[in-house]
Image: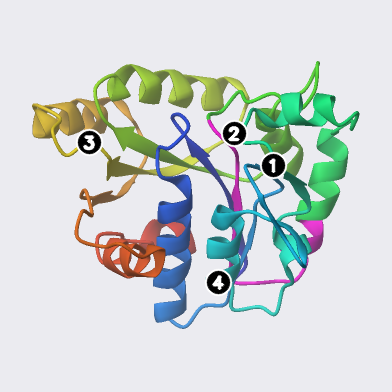
């Protein structure tokens, strides 16, 4: 079994990395090999080894295949701004075809489960003409949508689901990630989403307030996920 999915979010900070890492950890717990790619990341730290992004490092930590950092995150920007603006500031020209080439290289490694994590929401620009949605289209892989459960999530989620379908891609499943501990009427909001999103709900991750370390959050989150729909 070799499955690949594009992990998209309803917005920035919806919890894509947490959910992607938890899905990878869940797969490993079931004896599956894993790999991940975050083709472009902004908000990187300078290190002796080069620019490093915390989200990409977390993904790398959940890869059972022996990948190196630049395979997981081939395009990195120091500024924590929209990637296409960061590229413009540096005079760099990102192209979807090149990002796809990097990604396909990891997909070709043949892990049982490979996740490709986007940046921000579905329509984040890559350049003046292309968005990260175009990358998902070129890769032609199903999408996992991470819904950041907070006020406004119904509109954000349904618009993203609509855009994914309009782009001709399959929504393989979605995850409800509770990011606002004070949100009112959570159950009612989730019931509305379940009624209107015609794809499997892979899990509901609660607000994980008691975990300071990313690894602890990942271990906790995986217990709330079911990947059967992704690996069958």
Q: Quadrant of residue 97?
A: top right
Q: Closer to the observer: label 2 or label 3? A: 3
Q: Is residue 165 visible?
A: yes
Q: For the residue carrying disc 4, how many other residues have a C-alpha within 10 Å: few (<14), some (14-19), or many (20+)?
A: some
N-terminal label among 4 and 3: 4
Answer above or below: position of 123 versus 3.
Answer: above
Say if 15 sits above or below 192 in the image: below
| Residue drawn at 61 percent across, 57 percent down | 56
Distance, label 1 to label 4, CA atoms, is 26 Å
- Tell me if label 2 and label 1 are in contact, CB under 8 Å: yes
What span is colored magenta in the figure? Answer: 104-120
Residue at 84%, 33% (x, y): give it: 94
Question: Could you tell which of marks 2 and 1 lies nearer the N-terminus?
Answer: 1
Q: Dot 3, crowdedness within 10 Å: few (<14), some or many (≥20)?
A: some
Check disc 3 and report the residue beneath it: 180
Residue 14 is situated, as x and y percent measured from the top left of the image, at 40, 37
Disc 2 designates what residue?
Answer: 169
x%, y% of residue 200? 34, 45
- The residue where tag 4 is placed is 61
Q: Indicate which disc residue 173 carries.
A: none
Disc 1 target residue: 140
């Amino acid at each position: 079994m070799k499955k690949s999915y594009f992990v998209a979010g309803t917005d920035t900070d919806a919890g894509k990395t947490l959910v992607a890492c938890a899905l990878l950890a869940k797969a490993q717990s079931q004896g599956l090999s894993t790999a991940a790619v975050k083709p472009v990341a902004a908000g990187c730290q300078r290190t002796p080894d080069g620019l490093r992004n915390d989200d990409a490092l977390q993904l790398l930590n959940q890869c059972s295949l022996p990948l190196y950092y630049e395979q997981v995150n081939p395009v990195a920007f120091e500024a924590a701004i929209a990637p296409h603006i960061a590229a413009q500031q540096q005079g760099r020209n990102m192209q979807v075809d090149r990002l796809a080439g990097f990604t396909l290289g990891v997909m070709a490694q043949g892990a049982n489960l490979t996740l490709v994590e986007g940046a921000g929401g579905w329509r984040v620009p890559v350049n003046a003409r292309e968005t990260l949605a175009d990358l998902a289209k070129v890769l032609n892989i199903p999408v996992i949508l991470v819904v950041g459960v907070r006020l406004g999530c119904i509109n954000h989620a349904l618009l993203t689901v609509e855009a994914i379908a309009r782009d001709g891609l399959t929504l393989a499943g979605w995850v409800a990630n509770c990011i606002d501990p004070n949100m009112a009427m959570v159950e009612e909001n989730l019931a509305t989403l379940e009624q209107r999103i015609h794809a499997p709900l892979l899990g509901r991750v609660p607000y994980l307030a008691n975990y300071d370390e990313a690894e602890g959050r990942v271990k906790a989150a995986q217990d709330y996920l079911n990947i059967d729909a992704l690996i069958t």
